[in-house]
Amino acid sequence: MTAPARPDGEPRVIGGLEVRRWALDLGATTLLLAVGIAGFWPTFGGPAYLPAALGGLLLGLAIAAGATWRRWGVLVIAGLTLAAYILFGTVLAVPHMGLLGFIPTPESLWRLVLAIVTSWKELLTTVAPVGTGDSHLVVPFFLTLVAAVLVASLALRVRPAAWALVPAVAYLVAQIALGTVEPAAPIVQGVVFALVAAVWIAVRQAWQPVRAAISVGEGGEPTGMLARRLIAGAAVLAVATGAGVAVGAAAAPEGPRYVLRDVVIPPFDVRQYPSPLQSFRGYVRDFADEPLFTASGLPEGGRIRLATMDAYTGTVYNVADDGAGSSSAFTPVRSIMSPDAEGTPATIRIEIAGMRGVWLPDAGAVRSVAFDGPRADELRRSAYYNDATGTGVVTMRLGEGDAYTLETLLPGDPSDERLADEKFAPLRMPKQKGVPPEFAEIASDIVGDAATPIEQVRALEQTLSQDGFFSHGLEGQVLSRAGHGAERIATLLRGDQWIGDDEQYAVTMALLAGQLGIPARVVMGFYPEEDDAGGLFTATGETLHAWVEVAFEDSGWVAFDPTPPEDQVPTDQTTKPRADPKPQVLQPPPPEQEPVDLPPTVPDERGAEDEENPLAGILGLIAIVLASILGVLTLLLGPFLVVGALKAARRRRRREAERPADRISGGWDELIDRASDYGTPVRRGGTRREDASVVSTAFDQPNVSTLARRADAEVFGPSEPTPAEIEEFWHEVDGIVGGMGKRVGFWRRLKARLDVRSLLAGTRFALPDRRVVRAKPVRSAHAAASDDGTDSAVKRRPLRERATAVGQGAASQWQRVRAAVRGIRSSRDEGSSS
């Protein structure tokens, strides 16, 4: 729609708004949101997200501009936003699910509905940079779409344009929170945002029209008005600049940068996998000479860690389940891990051969992991790491051909002299369960008179390694059963000879240390023999080991090897048949025999969990569907609830006003506001009879004029209206409003319920009138005096006499109004008495 031609020099108007202001507001919105769009670059590792983000920006600008031009309300804007998300979401956010990449399919539409709820968590729990194959693009698309609609709508509709900076800043803050700890260009983002906001608000302030009560003629603006505009402009500039500086400071890299990615708990539970220590003997037997993986760059004395376990259940040593800080607290791998670790930097490359499973071989305190090979992207997105234990997990499971490079810090090996004055670290270790009671006495006897912490640990280590014998229990070796349950460890300590391998000795030392309050844990991993140190290390079953780590106050976790040397075997072969069946030792006391025959084992427990998985999966899917439906309903019904609550509170406030006359005038205001919601162009500031004329013409309600006269009589009458009169008046108001609703269609009634024009009327956020009303020329005081009933000869009188005449005319007119009101009341009273 094009407005009529205007005089030269005046801006062209479309729909009541200046074209130049439209261009300015939409351009400023684009630049402000572009600052936040640029911040997603590190999250996606490149420009792959730009089509989704820029598409959401253009759609949001189009919706805001069209809704402003057509003067649509909140309901229509919300519906258009949701429709744009559904219609364009396939091509912009999930093209891999669409037909030919852009045609929506049931799968893509269902994915878009679910992504409103699930995409945020998926983005935060996926290692950055994230890929575009899933629904990660929904986040920049949907977030930018909603932000563009809000910012552009406020910029085009609200007179103090600075209010549009609120959603713009919120969008930038949301981008920072959803991003990574490595910002894109924080200084540039802050400076650009501040400059754009300041220049935009300054220009808008300069273009703001002056509403003066008197005509300024050709002499320019009044001095007071000009001063107020200058002060207001300076204040807005200061606010915009401060907002930009604050945004720049929040995005700056100096100091700690907190993002949601670092605090969201990932949907991963390592306890669903069996303890790797259970497969120790299997690796030794089946992969004795077969390469499991190769490691290059491992320094001399370095160890490859496979898993760390700190909780004993009486059956198995596994990761603890007491939350953050324990061996089960895994988070997605990221570019900067183990921030507080100290040690010697090293770069280690590992190539997988026969290794299988979820446990990721690593070394030291890993700072970053870079996968390569055909499954690099899948491995990266499914990799998790525990900073406290230095353990990595890949839920995709390792396979032949996988490879990765570790940037790590290898801890030093402190000497006993350095540890002589150190205490044990004050850590709260998981409580050991199922430990035979005599273990505490055995541990105390071994430690004996050891005074310092390091002497106590060395006593446990040396007693086991020097007095015990080594055997894997394989063919040709002394009998040695696998496992590390309470019964197996008790058999080892009660026997005439201690026989076992790394699995039994490491668990035994950790259990004995735990009985003395020493913070100890079991580690399973690989390290080369002393003769093979240096160069390329090939891990096999022969190089698999288990050892114990003890925490010291200053040196941290220190490794100890309680396993006897492999050549330390029993010389008396007759001990072979006596190592396992010792009934005279196992029978007393009977309760201690219970762990031997007690099922279920760990595999049995996992089998029981698997049986329940189908039901759990169905319940989980139902929960996701219900959450998605709830999110969509909240998005759709939210405006209804908010606007309806505000209008109900306004009606209650008017009907319960303190003064009876205010309740009458409040009822009339309620009628006019409801008529305005239905689209009636009621002019603000008119009399009740003028408003009644507009409403009665629009809805064919002749009794509105009668109600207007009654409202004037009740409000300006000599006495206050009674409660019965107030109740009757509101009853008539409700009847007229109900008649309005019957004359319009369902969609118009729905639109009226969400229309906020009447709520914003009289405030600084008031929306433009529904129709363009041409401003009347400024009339002189002579015309005003004539309208008040004064003689036209007043025009020729001096100014003081002219003002006196105007006042007398207004006074006489007021006297006539009061007399008419008294006549109406006396007629009503006579009718009541008769």
Image: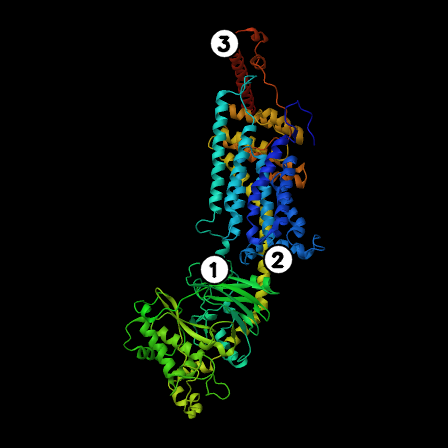
Residue ranking furthest to the bottom: 574
On the image, the x and y values in percent for residue 606 come to 53, 73
Mark 2: which secondary structure?
A: loop
Callout 1: helix, strand or loop?
loop
Q: Amino acid at mark 3?
A: Arg
The residue labelled by disc 2 is: 134
Q: Find the distance from the CA under tag 1 to the CA under tag 3.
A: 85 Å
User: How far apart are the alpha carbons under marks 3 and 2?
Assistant: 80 Å
Mark with earlier residue (3, 2): 2
| Label 2 vs 1, first from the N-terminus | 2
**Where does residue 710 sit, x and y in percent of width and height?**
57, 26
Residue 224 visible at all: yes
Judged left or right of residue 550, residue 74 is right
Q: Answer yes or no: do the residues labelled 3 and 2 have beta carbons within 8 Å?
A: no
434 and 766: which is toward the camera: 434
Say few, some or many: other residues with alpha carbon within 10 Å of mark 3 (under 14 / 14 to 19 / 20 or more).
Answer: few
Disc 1 target residue: 337
Instruction: Find residue 800 and name its label.
Output: 3
Q: Is the residue 165 above or below the residue 102 in the image?
A: above
